[in-house]
Every structure is written in structure tokens, then in C-alpha cells.
Image: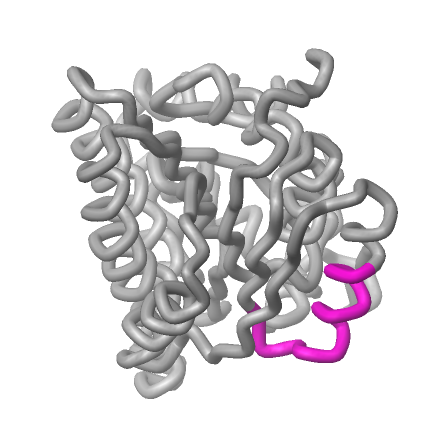
Amino acid sequence: MKAMNENNRGKTVLITGASNGFGLEFARLFAKDGYNLILVSRSTDRMKKLAYKLQDDHQLEHVCVVTSDLARPESAREVYEEVKKSGIQVDVLVNNAGAGIHGFFHETDLERENAIIQLNVNTPVALTKLFLQDMKLRDEGKILNVASVVAQIPSPLMAVYGATKAFLLSFSEALSNELQHTNITVTALCPGASNTMFFRRAGAAHTKAAHGPLSEPAEVARDGYEALMSGETKIVSGMMNKVQATASNMVPDSTSAAAMRKMMEEAEGEEKYHVET
């Protein structure tokens, strides 16, 4: 990994879904680089402990914890206004929070899926709109959107999740082009199956994907962080995921969908749990 850049000290990053998984690892990476932190999550107590530890460990000027359920339509505006009232300038926005639900679409809960669409699509779009407008006035800033390798692959048994990530990838690449003549960059991070709480929360802990080779959150976050700092438009984390993403462009979507469905089916002989970090 590249050496951390102390020139970033004093800048501020806002990270959504920072209480575990990729978000937690992003917080550690940014703090190590001297970034002040705004951590957004529903887990207030856990976030405060993390924030104050990182502040002490890295001598940060300030940390801020914003408690918000980002599946609520009004959450993005509330987060933005709270940050503005504090007088803090957001130099980097990391849209990391996301969720999925496993099962056949005709059997899954519509209310929960609407909340997932809000969390995975509407809230990142709104946060990006609000903070990007401020970045544009300064002609400086960075945005990282956590998509997924399934953004390029139809995802049976997780149809809504896959579709939201496809949106986020397309959205990020389009914004990157719009901003190409500015000092603002937009990066899409596309991880594969990872050792986080995602599968359990999605009701997919019993699937083959959850028991297959899993990426470690720290490695995924490191790939995303380096791509963000380099101004890359897109990064697929992990060699096997890169192979999968490349192969998806060379075979019919129906073939990719069939392969993905097998991965999302129950793993024979496996207990229905997932080891979490």
C-alpha cells in the first residue's frame, strides 16, 4: 500500500455506514491520513467509541457522530443541514451504507425493498447532490460510492440489490465524466462477496456466496481508498472479482445470471450462519 499522505491533515471526510465492515475500515484509513471524521450511522454509542479512539490515536482536530437512519427519505437533507450548522466543510464524501434482501422477488417484502432502494440509491444521490454543489463552488472534492461487482451482473435472488448497485455504478461513472475538467473526482468501488454482516442482514447467510472465498473488509477499503486518492473512476476490488467482472462482458447476460443464481442458492451441508468481523 502507498504511504499515507499527511498533506490531507485537517480535511474532513463524511462516511455513511461507518459502524462496521467497509465503513469502519474507511474510517481507520482516513484517520490515519489525518482526516477529521464525520461518521453517520444508526449505532450512536458504537460510533462514538470508534470516533474518540481514532481521534486519540491520530490526534485529529475533531470527530463528529451523526445518528441517522439513512433509509428515511428525509435523512440526507437532515444530515447535510446538521453538518452545515456545525460549520464543517466536507472535503470527501463516502457513500458506503447499503443493504440487500435475499429471495425471489415475488416473495420478498415490498416495504423492505423500498427502504433498500432509499438507502442504496435515493440517499446517496441526495447526499451527492448536496455536498457536490458545495464542492463545485470550491472546485475541489472527492466522492466515493460503494457499488458492487454485481453492478455488472444480473442478480437473481437479490434482484433489487443488484439493480441498485447497477444504478450507483452508472451514476458514478456519469458524474465522473461531467466533472472531468474540474478538481472534483467521483470513484465507484466494486467489491465482491466480503466478510461483513451483509449476508446475515440480507437473509443470505446460508448461500454458497456467503460460504465461498470472501474478501476482507480492510483489503476492500484499502483498494477503494487508493483509487479515490488517485482519482480513478472505477475500481473492482480483488483479482477474482476483476476476472468475474471482465468475464461478464464476454458472455450473454443470461449466462451470467444463471451463474449468479447458483451462487445465491443454499449451500449444501453448510450451517446457516456467517462468520462476521
| 226 displayed left or right of 231 | right
Comparing 23 with 189, the one in front is: 23
Quadrant into which the C terminus falls: bottom right
Q: Is 197 above or below relative to 78?
A: above
Q: Is 202 above or below relative to 268?
A: below
- Residue at the (79%, 51%) spot, across then down: 54
Quadrant into which the N terminus falls: top right
Q: Is 26 above or below relative to 224?
A: below
The colour style of the image is one colour
State the predominant SS element of the stretch in magenta. Answer: helix
Q: Residue 202 appears at what percent x and percent y?
A: 56, 69
What is the residue that sits farthest to the left in this orientation? 178
Magenta segment boundaries in residue numbering:
41-52
Comparing 54 with 264, the one in front is: 54
Q: Is residue 49 magenta?
A: yes
On the question of residue 38 being in view, the answer is: yes
Q: Residue 275 appears at what percent x and percent y?
A: 83, 59
Comparing 80 with 239, the one in front is: 80
Q: Quadrant of residue 44?
A: bottom right
Q: Quadrant of residue 45?
A: bottom right
| 192 displayed left or right of 93 | right
Q: Residue 91 appears at what percent x and percent y?
A: 42, 40
- Residue at the (60%, 25%) spot, across then down: 223
| 119 displayed left or right of 183 | right
Q: Is residue 92 magenta?
A: no
On the question of residue 213 being in view, the answer is: no
- Residue at the (65%, 55%) spot, across then down: 62
- Residue at the (65%, 19%) spot, across then down: 5
